[in-house]
Amino acid sequence: MKKNIKGFILSFVLLISPFLYSAEKGKTLSPDVVKTNFNADISNVNLDFLNQTITPEVLKSKAQADFSQIPDFAFSYLNNLVVNAINASVSSFDGVMYSINMKDVPDALIAARDRGVKVRLIIDENHVYPRMDTQIKRLINAGPGIEVRTLKGYQDYGRT
């Protein structure tokens, strides 16, 4: 279970990191983009907290995290966000994923390949050897145009 959580977090960071730069510039988390991708209206949501740098005061007692200012949709619809990113690819899609467990990602990758997008993926080798995951097997068996490579991951990330 711990390994799956680490993998999800790594996948999330690697897949979403290109959007974070755009979000910082105000391009990704705009009302139009959210309306188009998530069918949600955020025109009345105060997003000023995204542009603030807050230095917390040192507390003498244990503090609890307060996520009340983060909109409900901020971490929702990851499947749609990844699929929309793949669908927006024009010439190439390069992805690094721990595993492919979101339902529509393989279909989006195959569709991207079919429209001429160069698709390259790096995945953890534990999802190919000794037994291949179903979604990865679909991509490998989809024919030429989708390049899948493996990388040997380590169980304890960040340790030297």
Image (cartoon, rainbow, N blue to C red):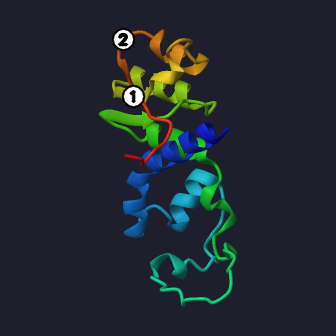
Query: Label 2 sits on what residue type?
Result: Pro
Where residue 127 appears, as percent x and y from the top left, is: 53, 22
Q: In which quarter of the view is residue 151 placed?
A: top left
Q: First in sequence, mark 2 or 1: give its number.
A: 1
Query: Does 8 appear above or below 130?
Result: below
Residue 102 vs residue 27, the one in the foreground: 102
Query: Does 23 appear above or below 106?
Result: below
Q: In which quarter of the view is residue 49 placed?
A: bottom right
Query: Label 1 sits on what residue type?
Result: Leu
Q: Which residue is mark 2?
A: 144
Residue found at x 53% / y 13%: 137
Residue found at x 59% / y 47%: 78
Q: Which labelled disc corresponds to residue 121?
A: 1
Where residue 75 appears, as percent x and y from the top left, is: 62, 56
Where residue 23 appears, as percent x and y from the top left, is: 43, 64
* Contact check, label 2 and label 1, Cβ < 8 Å: no
- How many neighbours does mark 2 have within 10 angstroms: few (below 14), some (14-19), or many (20 or more)? few
Left or right of 20, for residue 4: right
Say what secondary structure mark 2 lies in. Answer: loop
Left or right of 71, for residue 114: left
Say what secondary structure mark 1 lies in. Answer: strand
Left or right of 15, for residue 35: right
- How many neighbours does mark 1 have within 10 angstroms: few (below 14), some (14-19), or many (20 or more)? some
Left or right of 14, for residue 36: right
Q: In which quarter of the view is residue 65 placed?
A: bottom right
Query: Does 67 appear above or below 109?
Result: below
Quadrant where the N terminus lies?
top right
Q: Residue furthest front?
A: 160
Residue 37 vs residue 143, the one in the foreground: 143
Where residue 156 appears, as percent x and y from the top left, is: 49, 42
Q: Which labelled disc corresponds to residue 57?
A: none
Q: How far apart, in angstroms, are the residues tagged by discs 2 and 1? A: 13 Å
